[in-house]
Image: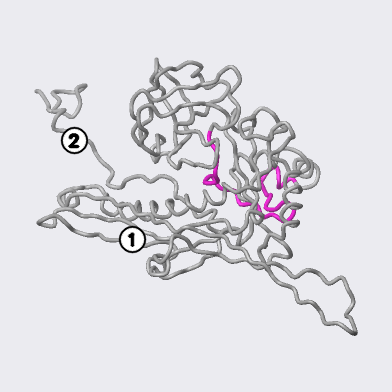
Amino acid sequence: MTIQTATASVGQPLSNSIRTQYIEDYLEGAEMERLYDQLAAPIGKPMETLQRGSSVQVDFLSDMQPGTTAISEVADITPQALRDATASISPTSRGEALQCSEKLLIQAYTDYGAKQFKRVGKGLMESLEVLARDAATQGSLVVRPNATARTRITLSAILTGHRATDGLFSDVTTMLMNYKCPSFTGMGGRRWAAIMHPAVFHDIREDGNVNSVGLYQDKGIVLNYELGNIGPFALVVSPWAKVLYSTGVAAATSDVATTLSTAASALSKTITVAAATHMDGVVSPWITIGTLETGNTHYPLNERVRYLSHTGTTITIMGEGANGGLRFDHASATAVTNKYSVYTIVFGGPTSLAKVFATEVGEYGEIVGPKRDGLVDQFVTLGFKWYGNYGRISETWLARAEVAASADSV
């Protein structure tokens, strides 16, 4: 007797009648977090005020000169004149949307419709955080470790003198105190935040005085990563801290300098490059896709992936997308390199940045929709909008360190 089965190993299969079992939920990537926004003092303005000019002005007033002479008994005091200066923030706007057909929402057995709201909210938050991050990481007060590493492109992951140590914090403390940078209050004295990537946090724990204290006095630093402060700085460790991907020195004799030969799609786990020369992941296993940020123009779609293997010019990678692939789409001819990256540490207080926003839309923007359009309302659109901007109030109220990290060679 012939029995119809689902597999070819027993009886007669009906392979085309057996459907794949699907899970109804889309799997998510890591949640974005507001990081540099905590250094910004909000300045809410009505939309009509923002529309009256091209910028919003923040005013400064000079100090009085200290008195150096005694009061005369026969002549009056000469009054002093104060000076004023201004800093300006040019408001901008951000708005993006998703659109799908009504039929898709009716027929879809996944939770695509529900995920639209979450994706739009995440897109709004990341769009605003990019503005805050750029303002926080493009200031003029920059320090780099080691006298031989005074430029970004000379920083090397394999040189210990190019990495972050506790000594760097002492130098920045002197700077911020000298410039009277406003600090957080109610935290037991003068306190600032130091925002850094986990790779930088690792090097600080593993080197210098912090490592010695961890080995001989406080094992929690080594075993539990219990290091919350250095001097007057509260350490804010986040994977969303700004990294200038592949802007350091070339990876010795294994320098990769090529481009994408075909476009790469978000969530893809492979990329195709023009040439795979030195593509082996031995010296530097990290690959950057995007335009190198050698100056103060940043590219939010840049991303770094880890090399796994390659066949010819097809490279298998591991990225930060929800499925372990790419986060974003990348066009053909986009640069691909494995140079060492440069990591930022941003030091500042609660008013190191200013944030201007339109009160009608709100400090953190507004979700618009879902809206139906089309002649028969057959399209559904969901988006966000925001009006405002971030800016540095004073270049002396925000410091940035640029360092290499040992994690780049692991």
At a point 61% along the width and 62% down the height, the residue shown is: 350
Tell how many labels: 2
Q: Amino acid at mark 2?
A: Arg
Which residue is labeled 1 in the image?
367
Give the label on residue 19, or none.
2
From the viewer's side, name the closer residue of 27 and 179.
Answer: 179
Residue 268 position, x and y percent, is 35, 32
Residue 11 position, x and y percent, is 15, 23
Alpha carbon separation for disc pair 2 and 1: 38 Å
Asked if residue 48 is among those painted magenta in the image, a careful observer would answer no
**Which quarter of the image is occupied by the N terminus?**
top left
Q: Amino acid at mark 1?
A: Ile
Residue count near mark 2 (Cα–Cα under 10 Å), binned few <14, some 14–19, many ≥20: few
- The answer to whether 402 is drawn above or below residue 49 in the figure is above
**Which quarter of the image is occupied by the C terminus?**
top right
At a point 62% along the width and 57% down the height, the residue shown is: 394
User: Is residue 211 toward the left or the right of residue 361 in the image?
Assistant: right
User: Is residue 221 toward the left or the right of residue 290 in the image?
Assistant: right
Residue 341 position, x and y percent, is 57, 33
Residue 226 position, x and y percent, is 68, 49
Magenta region, residue range: 219-245
- The answer to whether 317 is drawn above or below residue 187 in the figure is above
- The answer to whether 146 is drawn above or below residue 55 in the figure is above
**Which tag is nearer the camera, tag 2 or tag 1?**
1
Q: Quadrant of the rendered structure where residue 272 is?
A: top left
Which residue lies most toward the front here? 75
**Considering the numbered disc 2 on the image, is that residue within a helix, a strand or a loop?**
loop
**Considering the numbered disc 1 on the image, is that residue within a helix, a strand or a loop?**
strand
Q: Are marks 2 and 1 in contact (CB under 8 Å)?
A: no
User: Is residue 292 toward the left or the right of residue 272 in the image?
Assistant: right
